[in-house]
């Protein structure tokens, strides 16, 4: 039985003040709903610079946190990068790898993403591998070709140990930040195909790996999307910046 996970990707948003308000809201909201944290894993991915603030506020709560990206190198002359060890200094337990914005805006390749998954997983962090097709690729019926290529790169390149805790987020690029969402049927179809692909590699891994849906998830559409048997929760961008929306998405995963 896979425990659902709802994770909020704050992207490059927030100030000390707004982050503080968001964290206060999460603490207060969850203190009245202790059961929710037992039934659903909840996580947030703040900008790295807020990691200490997040750690200070969330340490005694059911919410985990992680970084939106990490470097595959251990340390040294890599200006602007954050290492896994640094992430762990701030009690991060997760890291996103290959978010579509990293792939499209910063040129991350499948090989780069696989290296990040490997680095994070080897260090004991939970890698959240993001995959998904563009609108042109969906319209050209290439969805599974693209998603399979992205997943296979990781299965082939990352060490088995790094995949123990792997989470996959299926995020159709055309649905990220656009207000468009995959239908529950479209999401379930891709999730089931990803699980089949994992099963060809390792049946146990296929059974245990949580596959999240991401792409304009809101309180109003989360329940129907999460109802798919292969949908194990969500990766949430915009709506995770609003405490009430985010908590209602968490509730929908229960
Ligand atoms: C995301 O950035 O991972 C995402 C799913 O964003 P949004 O929910 O805003 O579409």
Image: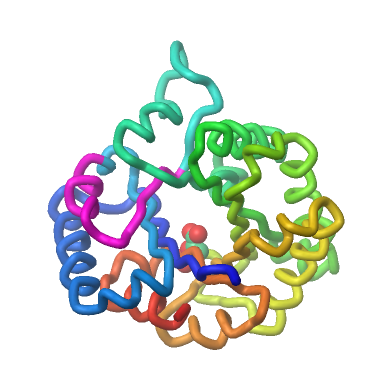
Residue 8 x %, y %: 40, 61
The colour mode here is: rainbow
Which residue is at 41% across, 77% downward?
249
Which residue is at 50% across, 38% downward?
124
Question: What is the magenta range?
Answer: 52-68
Which image quarter holds the N terminus?
bottom right
Residue 61's quadrant in the figure? Answer: bottom left
Residue 171's quadrant in the figure? Answer: bottom right
> Is 53 a magenta residue?
yes
Q: Is residue 33 above or below residue 66?
A: below
Q: In this view, does 185 lie above or below 160?
A: below
Q: Is any part of residue 98 visible from this angle? A: yes
- Residue 89 located left or right of residue 151: left
Which residue is at 71% across, 39% downward?
160
Give the camera-side residue of 199 and 79: 199
- Residue 230 located left or right of residue 202: left
Residue 93's quadrant in the figure? Answer: top left
Residue 222 x %, y %: 49, 81
């Amino acid at each position: 039985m896979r425990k659902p996970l709802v994770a909020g990707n704050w992207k490059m948003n927030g100030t000390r003040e707004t982050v503080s308000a968001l964290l206060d809201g999460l603490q207060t909201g969850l203190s009245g709903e202790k059961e929710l944290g037992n039934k659903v894993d909840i996580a947030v991915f703040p900008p790295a610079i807020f990691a200490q603030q997040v750690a200070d506020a969330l340490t005694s709560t059911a919410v985990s946190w992680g970084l939106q990206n990490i470097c595959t190198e251990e340390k040294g002359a890599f200006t602007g990068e954050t290492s896994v060890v640094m992430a762990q200094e701030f009690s991060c337990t997760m890291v996103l790898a290959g978010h579509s914005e990293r792939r499209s805006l910063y040129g991350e390749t499948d090989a780069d993403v696989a290296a990040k998954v490997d680095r994070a997983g080897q260090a004991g962090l939970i890698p959240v591998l993001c995959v998904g097709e563009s609108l042109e690729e969906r319209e050209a019926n290439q969805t599974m070709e693209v998603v399979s290529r992205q997943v296979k790169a990781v299965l082939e390149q990352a060490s088995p140990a790094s995949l123990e805790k792997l989470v996959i987020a299926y995020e159709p690029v055309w649905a990220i930040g656009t207000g468009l969402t995959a239908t529950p049927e479209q999401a379930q179809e891709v999730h089931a195909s990803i699980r089949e692909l994992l099963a060809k590699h390792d049946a146990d891994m296929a059974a245990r790996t949580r596959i999240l849906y991401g792409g304009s998830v809101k309180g109003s559409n989360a329940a129907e999307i999460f109802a798919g048997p292969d949908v194990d929760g969500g990766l949430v961008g915009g709506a995770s910046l609003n405490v009430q929306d985010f908590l209602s998405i968490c509730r929908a995963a229960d």
